[in-house]
Image (cartoon, grey):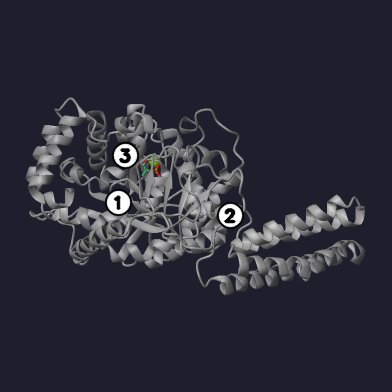
Amino acid sequence: MASSPREERRFQGQGVSPGVARGMAYVHRPAHDEVPSYPLPEGRAEEEIGRLEKAIAQTRAQLTEIQERLTGAIGAKEAVIFDAHLLVLEDPLLLDEVVRAVQDERVNVEFAVHRTAHRLADEMSRLKDSYLSERAADILDVARRLLQNLSGRSHPGLGLIHAEHILVAHHLTPSDTAQLPREFVRGFLTEVGSKNAHTAILARSLGLPAVSGLAKIDGAIETGAEILVDGWRGLVIVDPLPGTLQEYDEFERRRAQAEEDLNALRETASTTRDGRHLVLSSNLALCDDLPLISMCGAEGVGLYRTEVFFFQHDALPDEEAQFENYARVAEAVKPHGVIIRTLDVGGDKPLDCLDQPAESNPFLGLRGIRLALERREMFRTQMRAILRASAVGEVKMMFPMISGVAELRHAMQLLEECRGELRAEGRSFDEKMEVGIMIEVPAAALCAADLAREGIQFFSIGTNDLTQYTLAVDRLNEGVAALHDHAHPAVIRLIRLVADAGHEAGLWVGLCGEMASDLAMVPLLLGLGLDELSAASLMVPRIKRAVQSLDMAECRALAQHALTLPDPCAVTAACEALARERYGDLLG
Ligand code: PEP
Ligand code: MG
């Protein structure tokens, strides 16, 4: 009987991270399936069994180590319980069934371990024998440890998917996104999410195509389905037909060519036609992306979001671990530098290990520098690590979410204490390391002249938050996403105020929010007087080409004009008109 032809299905959402990805869907349902289940790709069984063997060896080593430690601390008698755990690891009842499930049913090893362990434990506990009930608990305990070792994390969750896939989820937090196994995730789609949310910003920075705002996608796509994610157009195609795939192959070929042409700009400077140099740097989320920084021709890193590094750990990373990470970045971006932003958690970026009480309005709560000043030891540890990294390469430090002079003074005083400690310990650091602040709260923008006199060297304007707080528009809420507009006259007037106040006091002024990636805004930002722009690496070559095709006189005239306009649409129209004339092909 002829099989019925597959039907291609299309879903339209919002493209939150550009690019195209194809692969097997994995539907993540955190409440139900802590342990993922997916079909193994052809020929993967042996590799999967190899993973199981490795996890068994790791588990055995851990259990033996715990047993030895306990023997020393409380005596061999108590430590004997671990013999039972070690025996589970040799149990053919468990292991043979897991291997059979992987080989015959072609399911992933995590699922096989989870299912088999639960089946055996259920059977044992039903026998109502206290010895066997304890064995049931042992089996589950060992299975949990095996799963942790299979994922390499103490909270396995999404880290357990070891096959190339497109992740489908109702919602992903920034911390989920930071922990995705990069080698396996090709892209993601979510029901909830917006372009300005940190999850989307992270996806752009990681170069992961992503589409959000897809209502009810979870029920419409099953794990194992073939899908294509088009992050440029916000389109998701399930079971794409051969014609669609061909169309996309051609699209990708043209895009790759365009990318190559842009990358040819790598060695050129981001200088306007009349010779004004704009420092153009990259935003960095994860060290895995360091190669992108030089590949895209950026002048180092203008914003390193260190919270993403913290999200990859189950506990707060200590000074040494942080130092190594910051030093690695400083080394990798040479001969350029890196601006390391101190921890900005809170808001939509809770850090689980801090166990913060829930807030009814987290964006207006204990976030960024406020939290740092409360958790002083954590803050000092980070500042010590950053200072020490300044001995390795060109490092600058930046405080997030400053809203007034008192906060800045407090942070500077703690920084000075850290410097004193390091001097006393004979540790080297750059005594002249530049320190700056993010301007992302309207209060800070309005008080920029006061803040500029507090011994800092630069401002970096965070337009994602500055827009959110100035316009009272939640950056996560898709319902008001259209109102989150950085071209609003209030926002551009604040940018001008900050640029002027900074320059007046001898500071340099940059901008690291997503406005820098909006190609139509480049002439306006130049005209408003910014000295630096920092954006996702993917955007750097495009921004560079935009800068190279502009003239400062026209950018200043545009800014003058835009500052007189009463509404965002008029500002955008004026900017787009100039951008189209100079580099229309880039605007699409
Ligand atoms: C900003 O607010 O513009 C910014 C760069 O910081 P984040 O997006 O990390 O809040
Ligand atoms: Mg911000």
Callout 1 touching callout 3 (CB < 8 Å): no
Q: Quick one: 187 or 124, which is closer to the camera?
A: 124
> Is disc 2's CB within 8 Å of ligand 1?
no
Q: How many marks?
A: 3
Q: Which residue corresponds to the image point at 44% horizontal and 38% vertical from the top-left?
A: 192
How far apart marks 1 and 3 lie (CA) works out to 11 Å
Image disc number at residue 463? 3
The residue identified by callout 1 is: 534
| Amino acid at dot 3 | Thr
Q: Amino acid at mark 1?
A: Ser
Q: Which mark is residue 36?
A: 2
Query: Which mark is first along the chain, 3 or 1?
Result: 3
Residue 17: image x %, image y %? 34, 49
Would you place residue 565 above or below residue 390 in this image? above
- Rounded to the nearest angstrom, the CA distance separating label 2 from label 1 is 37 Å
**N-terminal of the two: label 2 or label 3?**
2
Secondary element type, mark 1: strand
Left or right, 77 with respect to 505, comes to: right
Front residue of this view, candidates 525 and 439: 525
